[in-house]
Structure formats: C-alpha cells, structure tokens
Amino acid sequence: MPQRLRCAVPRGLSPAVSNTSRTTSRSAVLLLPPTPRAASTTRQYATATVAKISSFSLPVDYVPPTKPPTARPSDTRKSQLLRTYTSLLRSTPLILIFQHNNLTAVEWAAVRRELRIALGNVSSAGTDTTELVSRAQLQVIRTRIFDVALKIVEFHDPSKVAPTTVSALTGEKVQVVYNHDLSKAAFQAIKTATQGDKPLPEESAYAQISPLLAGPLAIFTLPAVSPAHLAAALSVLCPSPPTFPPPSRKKFPGYYDAVAQSGLQKLMLIGGRIEDKVFDLEGVKWVGGIEGGLDGLRAQLVHMLQSAGLGLTSTLEGASKSLWLTMESRRSVLEEEQNGGKTADKEESS
C-alpha cells in the first residue's frame, strides 16, 4: 500500500466554507414559519380585502357587452363556422358551388395552384387583378352549417329585431338590441320561415339552392363579379370547349399533371350564387361568356336603350307628321271650297 501524502488545506478554501455556512443559515431563517404576530397581521389584511370585494355585486340581469346572449354556444367551432359563412355570403358577390369526391391534400394543392396561375394571367380593364386573385379562394365547406347560414342571410332581418331591456354595470336600465347571427332572434326567424306547412316561395333564393346542398361541397369565391376571371376559373375547374377551352399544354404544363387531372375529375360544378341570384350550370356559363366583361354588358345596355329611344322618337315623330299632313290636306280642301264658292257667286252676279 503506498504511503499517504499529508498536505495543508489551501488558504482560499476557508473563506468559501464560512460564506457557505452563512448563506445556508440565512436561507434556513427565511424558511422558518412566520411569528404569530406576523401571521395575525397577514390574516387581518386578507380578511379586509375579501370584505371590500364582497361588498360589490353585479345586477342580476347584467349582460357583458363582449358576450351577448346566444341561442347556440358561441365558443364552439360550429358557431364560428356559421359566423364565417354568413359573413362570406353577405360580402361575396360571386360564389360557385362544387361537389367533390375525396380529394387528397396533394390534389387540392395542385388544383389551387393551376387556378391561381389561370386567374393571374387574366388582364381585365378597370379591375385590380392582383387584389382580386389574392382574395379568390377555393375551400371545402360544412354542408349543414352552410345551409343554416343561407337561411340566416335570407330570412333574418337585423333591423326588425326589437330592443331588450337589461341592466348596465351601474344598475341603470338600458335598451340593447341583440340581432347578431347567433342570437335567439335569428334562430326564431329561420325557424318561422322554414318550418310549417306553408312552402317557401319560388322566388326565394334558399328554395332554389337548397336542393343542391347535398353531399360534400366546396365553394369558389371571387370578391367581384368579373366575367373574365370567371371564364378563366371555368376553363380550369369545369372546361367545356369551345366557350371555355382548357389551358394549352405548352403554356400550362402543370395543368396536365396526373395529380392535378385526378383532382379536377373529382370536382363537379352544380350551380352558383351571383349578386344574390341563384344560377344553374348554364346560367353560370352565360355570365362567364359575357364579351368584354361588365363594360361590354354596360355597352350593350346603353345601345339597347339608345335603340329603344330612337324607335320611340321615330314613332312619335311619324304620328305627329301624319297628323300634320292630314290637317294640311284638309285645310287646302277647305280653302279650295271657299275660293270656289266665291268665284261662283261673282259669275252669278255678273
């Protein structure tokens, strides 16, 4: 066994050991329970605070402004989707409705890519193409919730909801109108309009579009009615030559990719909602086939009004001219008769 070496402790370790012991003793003091006097003081202060808080109470019928009463739970995903769909229906003038059949995420991405490229290549006068393309969307919807949103948009009139009397934070009675899309008034309005033996009127937009709301659905939305962009979207999503031919293989090779073609074959256009009017497949194609877009439609309307005005003017002028000619011919006949009578009287007197 080797012999042990005896060495002295270094001088620098003794201050460190003493500081550690002091720190440990201080920490131990802090961990000790408080004295009875300190504990009684803390309990008295907490009791006073609780007494002050308990003296303030809210009115029984107080409703927070940030959380109005609703017919459905407002914090669920279905309620948020319903509010999203109602806002979309009120703010979007052009909506195309498609049925889809189990598209994968890769197929959706390919379809959206080709649709974005086709819309970006449209040059329309008087329209901000960049803004319009950035806000165009192709999204999957929940059919049942979208059906309820259509009912709310058509049958619920927020301006006709009566105010409700509630208490403010100070206890004062105030009049508040709860007419939001999740309110009891909206729920009662659609219940009254759609339930019962009385059928919906034929001119109702919901009555026309409700038969189409079956199965898995997707919608394509545009923030403005642009026939040129609608034609470009139809040529990608629902090509029908010669009016809406598919993109050429040379300019758009990605359109003929196997993934994109597989996704497009699973989409079927069933109708649309344009400017609060319901259109079938042929009606949607008619809107997309307007030459010159809205400017061309306005030019056709102006030409039709001018033609109608010219025809009406010619008709009125023709009637007045014929009346004037009739009166002039009658006047000449009367003058001749009068002149002829005077000549005969002169001959008899002579």
Image (cartoon, rainbow, N blue to C red):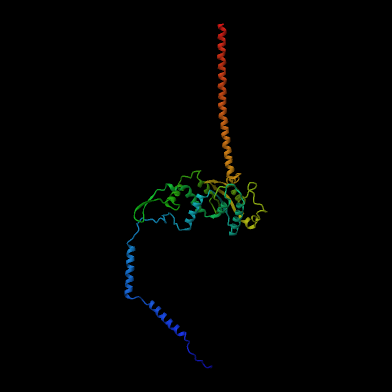
In this rendering, position of residue 163 left or right of residue 7: left
Say whether residue 97 is left or right of residue 67.
Answer: right
157 and 170: which is toward the camera: 170
Residue 55 image point, x, y percent: 32, 62
The one nearer the camera, 334 or 343, is: 343
Residue 50 to residue 287: above or below:
below
- Where's residue 326, x and y in %? 56, 22
Percent of width and height locating residue 237? 60, 52
- Left or right of residue 152, residue 266 in this image: right
Corner quadrant of residue 59: bottom left
- Above/below status of 291 relative to 77: above
Task: Estimate the x, y position of residue 127 in percent, counting from the top left.
Answer: 57, 48
**Foreground of the two, 102 or 248:** 248
Q: Nearer the viewer, residue 29 or 102?
A: 29
Name which quarter of the figure residue 296 lies in: top right
Q: How many marks?
A: 0
Residue 25 location, quadrant: bottom left
Residue closest to the far front? 11
Outermost residue, top side: 350
Q: Residue furthest right?
A: 250
Residue at image location 62% in from the left, 56% down from the top? 260
Q: Identify which residue is drawn at 32% across, 71% down.
A: 41
Residue found 52% across the figure and 53% down from its top: 143
Q: Residue at x 58, y 33 (%)?
A: 310
Quadrant occupied by the C terminus: top right
